[in-house]
Amino acid sequence: MKKVSINLLTNVILLLAGVILMVFHSVPDILLWGCRVMGAMFMLPAVVYLIMVAVRHTDARTGVDYMGVLPAVGGLCFGLVMILKPDKFDGILQLLMAVLLIVLGLFHVIYLMLSRKSLNVKGWYYICPLVVVLCGVLSLMVSSLRENVSTVVLMTGICLLLFNFTSLQEYLAERRVRNATAAVEPAVEPAPEPETAPAPKSDGV
């Protein structure tokens, strides 16, 4: 159940991210706003951790708590720099978006190849993940495409939707296999309980 919940949460987050990128792809300095959002994502858990350590009683603090202070401060400073100086990271963010597309596409391609027999995978199942991989490679290799930020952001948003569509295909294929397996399995009838003979009556003296 936990695995299903994590997969569902990941797909929902990527779906929302794809929709947001498609809607706001033409907004000026979209990558700068993306860097600011990522900076806030770095700062939030760092601030929460530092507050938890600070309010904890001194006797309750452990060595692990103190060891976590340094990376928390580092994440806080890094997130603050991303918010205040997003122009220093917009190129890196664009690179990360391209790498993300390649990783997501390859994940589905490999999963479909490994499950082609058990899930009866059709050839057209590979179209969407291969398109996602191709878009990621183009974002990395074609310099003229990288310079058109609006196109890259729009393409990334569309690819995230294709990722979710492939996840839906896999879920439906797995569900068909489960239903078919449940239909052919014979119902196991419970074994009849053995009849107990009545206890012999003892003759009174």
Image (cartoon, rainbow, N blue to C red):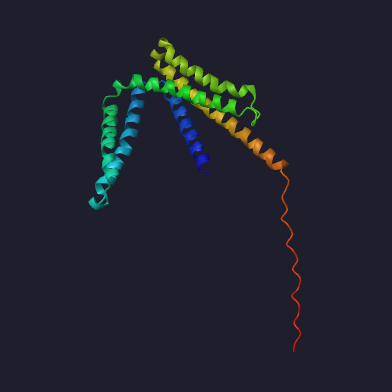
Residue 184 in the image: x percent, y percent?
73, 41
Residue 197 in the image: x percent, y percent?
76, 70
Residue that extends furthest to the bottom in the rendered view of this protein? 205
Question: Residue at (62%, 35%) from the top-left corner?
Answer: 174
Question: Residue at (75%, 82%) from the top-left corner?
Answer: 202
Q: Quadrant of residue 123?
A: top right
Residue that extends furthest to the front in the rendered view of this protein? 205
Look at the image and tell me whether residue 103 can be seen. yes
**How many numbered discs, if any?**
0
Residue 26 to residue 196: above or below: above
Q: Does residue 80 appear left or right of residue 120 in this picture?
A: left
Residue 1 vs residue 38, the one in the foreground: 1
Can you say which quadrant of the picture contains the C terminus?
A: bottom right
Residue 113 vs residue 129, the one in the foreground: 113
Residue 200 vs residue 70, the one in the foreground: 200
Residue 56 to residue 21: above or below: below
Q: Does residue 17 appear left or right of residue 184 in this picture?
A: left
Q: Does residue 54 appear left or right of residue 140 in this picture?
A: left
Residue 171 in the image: x percent, y percent?
59, 34
Residue 101 to residue 13: above or below: above
Residue 98 to residue 52: above or below: above
Residue 29 in the image: x percent, y percent?
34, 21
Question: Residue at (35%, 34%) from the top-left corner?
Answer: 41
Residue 37 vs residue 190, the one in the foreground: 190
Question: Residue at (47%, 31%) from the top-left corner?
Answer: 14
Look at the image and tell me whether residue 29 can be seen. no
